[in-house]
Amino acid sequence: MSCLRNSVKSPSDVSRLVEKLTEALGTDYHMLKTRIKPDACCGAIIPEIDALKEILTEHPVEPDQIKSITVGVENRALSHVGTVGPQPKDITGAQFSSHFSLGLTIVKGSNDFKSYYEALGNHFSDPGVIDVARKVTVVHDEESEAIYPKTRLGKVTLETTDGQHRIAKVFHPKGSPENPLSQEELHDKFLGLASRVLTNDRAAKVLHAVQNLEQLKDIGELAELLTLTS
């Protein structure tokens, strides 16, 4: 509040402040610009996963055919997800490791919560995942730096053991406002997470209730569905 008071020194300042606070009021909803992560990892890794999947879709390879994977990122991502390394010690480290996460993409074909949770169960020591993770190098990239923070560039180069280089760039990762999850993808993510603490039937009922809130006679119906019983 003190900062606000210091910035308002005249009636014109008040006018500008009110104008800013009410700009596009009722027409521009920032919630609609929310990013919903399709994967259970740091958002900085998702563009990398998307780029790697793009390569794998066009040029499928087996893990033992991979010589190296090079990921180009801006400085912020480099410090956040490029420093944990290929063998994290806990689930947070795994979710903030480009190396380990891309190893999961290659070997397990998924970066959903179940993949990380199962990795926790074997102490992040799956030899196949670790082998690929050790082939990942995260480097600073000027092109990525130039467009951040407007967007994050997923820039991946995969080199195979026979000398082939495959490159992919993703400017709008899945889950971003420019490339949102479909309704089916949103439903699948919710059910995949909710079914870990609720039965499949109850999770489905919660989803249906949320989608039809205006039809509920009493919000207690939803509250009851969300209540865990011993």
Image (cartoon, grey):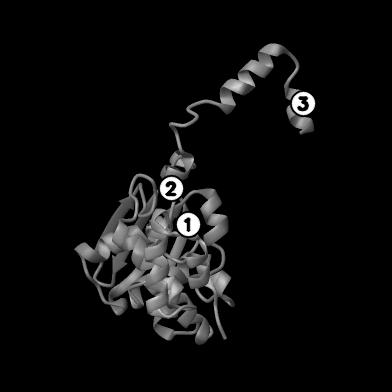
Residue 173 in percent (x, y) is at 36, 52
Is the C-beta separation of discs 3 and 1 under 8 Å? no
Residue 187 in percent (x, y) is at 35, 64
Mark closer to the chain start, 2 or 1: 1
Return the residue at label 3. Answer: 5
Q: Nearer the viewer, mark 2 or mark 1?
A: 1
Q: Type of residue at label 2?
A: Arg
Q: Whole-Å distance between the Cαs marked 3 and 2?
A: 36 Å
Mark closer to the chain start, 3 or 2: 3
Return the residue at label 2. Answer: 152
In the image, taking residue 120 as reference, residue 175 lies left or right, namely left
Is the C-beta separation of discs 2 and 1 under 8 Å? yes
In the image, taking residue 2 as reference, residue 130 lies left or right, namely left
Residue 54 in percent (x, y) is at 27, 60
Query: Residue at horizontal 37%, vertical 78%?
Result: 201
Which one is in front, 107 or 7?
A: 7
Q: Type of residue at label 1?
A: Gly
Mark closer to the chain start, 3 or 1: 3
Mark 1, residues whose alpha carbon is within 10 Å: few (<14), some, or many (≥20)? many
Res. 102 visible in picture: no
Q: Whole-Å distance between the Cαs marked 3 and 1?
A: 36 Å
Vertical side of 178 occupied by 215: above or below: below
Q: Residue furthest left?
A: 58
Q: Which secondary structure lies at badge 2?
A: loop
Residue 124 in percent (x, y) is at 51, 81
Which one is in front, 211 or 126?
A: 211
Return the residue at label 1. Answer: 43
Q: Type of residue at label 3?
A: Arg
